[in-house]
């Protein structure tokens, strides 16, 4: 895979903020208990800097602009594919503010979605785990020299990014699954009102081993090694308190030749997303509001859907382009809707009530019928491609690591998926895994805050 | 071929190709006269944004712009030199949906087509033209047919065939009738087989039921070309546990696979009895209903390869087997079912150029023999898991290769679009 184009780099990226020079060299406070072997070493002085309470700004300018989609004009979201990230003036990770803002950023070139099950046994241990996880994310984001554990200990850092961890080169999205809210931690009564376990839709082929999880941790970066560094680091430093359940790695293709990146069916994917720069749209569609069905602590969070969707690429490649275009509802070459003259043309289904132009069963028409009634069911779609070798019979195991965000699962994703049942596309795909998660709000500028604190 | 069993609704339809001529046609749409023009450029500079850019088209491939309006089809178009050309066709009409074709002098050989071109949009038509006379035909979905002037393509000869001849829709109907008659016969046989299976289960003869299950299942597995027509009965009879909430424990898990799961999974005949009864009932419902279940004439062509796509996905991965270890037997029956669809289409495919039908039939026969080789003299089949790596690879590879060939069939069977008017 070739390097992303200049255009991708400028639009793309988890909302990495920019380094403020070298981190201070200070020892990190051991603020966390060591129950269950949580290895909470510090990378350089990152933790110290983050907890010093001095440098936390509300919403860094570079971060705000990368999230609002204006990053193309004032500064790239992250460096040119190299590990050393050089961005300006922001000082905190994307989750330190009101929201987990990586949710809104354009997909990065590489990602890993890792589901974990908590094996900690008490509420206190769960709290330690959440603190440890949050701290580790902060440290990985800050970068710097890994902690020195002395000459007799194995190195604290896995070293795959070199002796010093690059600053601000990774972003995270953290979610909590419905399975956490059971008797283990006394959380049954705290379960979010609208968070459910993902059930099998007609035509799904779910593999339990690749479904659900107490936590989801998505790691986004511009390089595959940066993603894997963080996966290993988080797993190591939470060992004994949570156990990886499944993982799916993804990548985002560069624009071919321009416009929205393509999925592995060759179609541009995610064209019709709501505009993430419109705060009001995000309030209506993505962020959980105050005063809704959910508890106050959840406001500003969002619900995450993960679907691992295998594509039968050999079969797809044997279908005629015209058939593929009718199944999807767009031109393959250009991404144009079938009645439109460019990728971003808004399809006019009202003038095509019989489906002569865009079949009534076309994927984009069912998913988003563009009616007043269907508008509130829109989702923020964040797809990544995946390719992980072969099936047992030599068929390619490739597909889409689909994620989407919404303020209400039932009214949005589940409603959309209900419209897609038995769409013609189902012959060519097979959803095999994933889950629903609640992504808690951001940490609100409180350097001692940790994810899920509103829960415990 | 084992379709997923949705919790609700029929099994996934495969009829994604409703040609414009199958859909109801709206009243004549507003027509606005727009002067059509043609720009021919060698080198692609006139090519509209991003469609088959020069680099992808192969350096030096000529490109040309064609317009279609409500009153004119490619007015003033100029013939390119022989060889490859990428036309960009722009529908400048205000409200006419067209199918656009580039046809040879005989008006029947199609060299390039855009099956649906909405007003105000454009699409590319990538063609390879031997020297000869050509014209565009523009079929409005409302029924009107416009033709361009005929132009002469000159230049060096072109090797290979880059056209096809659409078939008569009536012939596809005849082929479908032939196929349906064949399915009806097999359904009778299937009914007897599930009768016997049911009675063995009811009389407590588990070993006998175990013997009767496979032949009955294979009778059904060769009918894949009609699964869509079977509708929700297809799921009742042959749905798998794959898409069901709760898998094999789901109350919606019925039919052959549920019975297999019970027979080979240690259930008693009295536990199996309701499943066997329900299966037999569903089969007899199907026998009664099939004469009234519609099959579109365009359905049979795609099934010639889609049956085996499912075999590759579900049988050759062992994913759907519930204990009988008969994936290879099912795969063989699926190939037989493909042969059944192909045979019905024989009169149509005979017109698709010399050797096409024979090549496909030979490929299918060889594949059937390759699977049949794993049947033991006593009627049992070698389990998929006991294949050596090279045996598995050989079957997978041959099946994939056959599928590449069969996937051309739907294109060969595109029906002629009826023209109700000409100008």
Image (spheres, coloured by chain):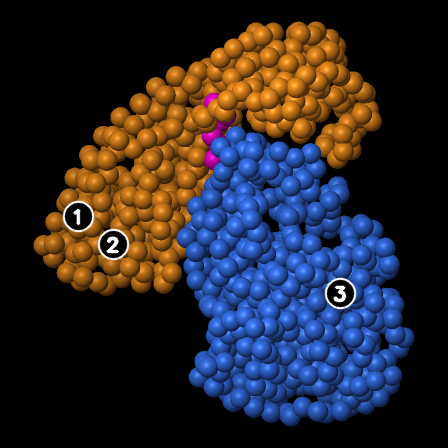
Chain colours: A blue, B orange
Query: Mark 3–mark 1 contact, CB under 8 Å?
Result: no
Q: Chain of mark 2?
A: B
Residue at the disc numbered 1: B197
The magenta stretch is B16-21
List the single residue furthest toward the left: B203
Point out the tag, 1 or 2, that comes first from the N-terminus. Answer: 1
Label 3: element kind? loop
Q: Is residue A438 left or right of residue B357?
A: right
Q: Quadrant of the C terminus of chain B?
A: top right
Mark 2 nearby-residue class (10 Å; few <14, some 14–19, many ≥20): many
Q: Chain of mark 1?
A: B
- Tell me how far mark 3 sits from mark 2, CA to CA: 54 Å
Could you say which disc has been placed on residue B259 in the image? 2
Query: Mark 3–mark 2 contact, CB under 8 Å?
Result: no
Taking depth in this image into account, of A152 and A391 the one nearest to the observer is A391
Could you say which disc has been placed on residue A15 in the image? 3
Label 1: element kind? helix
Query: Mark 1–mark 2 contact, CB under 8 Å?
Result: yes
């Amino acid at each position: 895979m070739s390097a992303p184009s200049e255009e991708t780099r400028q639009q793309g990226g988890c909302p990495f903020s920019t380094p403020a020079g070298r981190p201070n060299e200070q020892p990190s406070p051991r603020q966390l208990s060591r129950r269950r072997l949580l290895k909470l070493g510090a990378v350089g002085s990152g933790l110290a800097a983050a907890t010093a309470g001095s440098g936390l700004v509300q919403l860094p300018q570079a971060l705000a602009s990368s999230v609002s989609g204006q990053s193309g004009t004032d500064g790239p979201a992250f460096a040119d594919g190299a590990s050393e990230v050089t961005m300006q003036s922001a000082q905190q990770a994307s989750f330190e503010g009101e929201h987990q803002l990586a949710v809104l950023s354009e997909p990065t070139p590489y990602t890993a979605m890792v589901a974990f099950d908590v094996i900690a046994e008490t509420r206190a241990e769960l709290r330690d785990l959440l603190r440890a996880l949050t701290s580790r994310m902060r440290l990985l984001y800050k970068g710097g020299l890994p902690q020195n554990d002395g000459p007799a200990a194995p190195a604290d850092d896995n070293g795959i990014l070199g002796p010093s961890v690059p600053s601000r080169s990774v972003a995270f999205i953290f979610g909590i699954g419905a399975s956490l809210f059971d008797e283990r931690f006394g959380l049954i009564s705290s379960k979010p009102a609208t968070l459910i376990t993902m059930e099998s839709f007609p035509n799904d082929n779910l593999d339990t081993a690749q479904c659900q999880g107490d936590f989801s941790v998505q790691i986004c970066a511009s390089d595959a090694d940066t993603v894997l560094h963080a996966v290993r680091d988080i797993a190591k430093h939470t060992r004994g308190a949570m156990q990886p359940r499944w993982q799916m790695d993804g990548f985002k293709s560069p624009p071919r030749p321009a416009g929205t990146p393509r999925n592995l069916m060759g179609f541009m994917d995610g064209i019709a997303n709501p505009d993430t720069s419109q705060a009001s749209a995000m309030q209506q569609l993505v962020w959980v509001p105050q005063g809704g069905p959910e508890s106050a602590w959840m406001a500003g969070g969002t619900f995450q859907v993960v679907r691992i969707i295998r594509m039968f690429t050999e079969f797809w490649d044997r279908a005629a382009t015209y058939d593929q275009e009718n199944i999807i509802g767009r031109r393959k070459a250009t991404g144009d809707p079938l009645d439109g003259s460019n990728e971003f043309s808004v399809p006019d289904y009202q003038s095509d009530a019989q489906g002569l132009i865009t079949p009534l069963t076309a994927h984009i028409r069912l998913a988003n019928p563009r009616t007043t009634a269907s508008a509130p069911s829109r989702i923020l779609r964040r797809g990544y491609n995946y390719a992980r070798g072969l099936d047992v019979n030599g068929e390619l195991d490739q597909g889409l690591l689909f994620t989407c965000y919404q303020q209400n699962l039932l009214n949005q994703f589940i409603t959309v998926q209900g419209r897609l049942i038995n769409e013609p596309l189902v012959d060519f795909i097979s959803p095999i895994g994933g889950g629903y998660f609640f992504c808690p709000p951001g940490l609100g500028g409180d350097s001692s805050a940790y994810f899920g604190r509103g829960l415990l | 071929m084992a379709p997923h069993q949705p919790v609700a609704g029929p099994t996934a339809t495969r009829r994604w190709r409703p040609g414009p001529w199958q859909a109801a046609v709206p009243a004549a749409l507003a027509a606005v006269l727009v002067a059509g023009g043609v720009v021919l450029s060698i080198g692609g500079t006139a090519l509209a944004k991003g469609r088959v850019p020069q680099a992808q088209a192969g350096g030096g491939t000529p490109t040309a712009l064609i317009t279609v309006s409500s009153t004119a089809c490619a007015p003033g178009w100029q013939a390119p030199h022989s060889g490859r050309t990428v036309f960009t066709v722009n529908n400048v009409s205000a409200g006419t949906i067209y199918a656009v074709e580039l046809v040879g002098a005989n008006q029947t050989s199609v060299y390039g087509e855009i099956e649906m071109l909405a007003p105000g949009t454009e699409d590319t038509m990538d063609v390879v033209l031997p020297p000869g006379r050509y014209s565009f035909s523009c079929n409005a979905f409302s029924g009107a047919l416009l033709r361009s002037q005929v132009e002469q393509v000159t230049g060096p000869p072109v090797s290979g065939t880059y056209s096809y001849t659409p078939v008569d829709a009536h012939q596809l109907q005849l082929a479908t009738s032939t196929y349906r008659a064949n399915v009806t016969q097999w359904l009778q046989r299937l009914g007897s087989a599930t009768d016997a299976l049911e009675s063995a289960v009811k009389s407590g003869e588990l070993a006998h039921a175990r013997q009767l299950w496979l032949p009955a299942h294979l009778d059904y597995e060769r009918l894949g070309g009609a699964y869509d027509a079977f509708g929700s009965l297809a799921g009742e009879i042959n749905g798998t546990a794959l898409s069901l909430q709760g898998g094999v424990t789901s109350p919606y898990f019925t039919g052959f696979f549920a019975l297999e799961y019970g027979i080979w999974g240690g259930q008693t005949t009295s536990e199996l009895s309701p499943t066997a009864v329900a299966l037999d009932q569903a089969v007899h419902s199907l026998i009664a209903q099939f004469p009234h279940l519609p099959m579109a004439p365009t359905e049979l062509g795609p099934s010639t390869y889609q049956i085996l796509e499912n075999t590759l996905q579900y049988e050759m991965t062992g994913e759907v087997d519930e204990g009988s270890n008969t994936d290879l037997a099912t795969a063989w029956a699926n190939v037989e079912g493909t042969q059944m669809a192909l045979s019905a289409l024989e009169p149509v495919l005979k017109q698709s150029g010399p050797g096409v039908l024979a090549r496909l039939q030979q490929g299918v026969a060889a594949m059937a023999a390759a699977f049949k080789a794993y049947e033991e003299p006593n009627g049992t089949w070698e389990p998929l898991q006991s294949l050596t790596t090279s045996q598995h690879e050989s079957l997978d590879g041959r099946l994939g290769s056959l599928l590449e060939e069969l996937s051309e069939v739907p294109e060969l069977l595109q029906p002629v679009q009826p023209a109700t008017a000409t100008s």
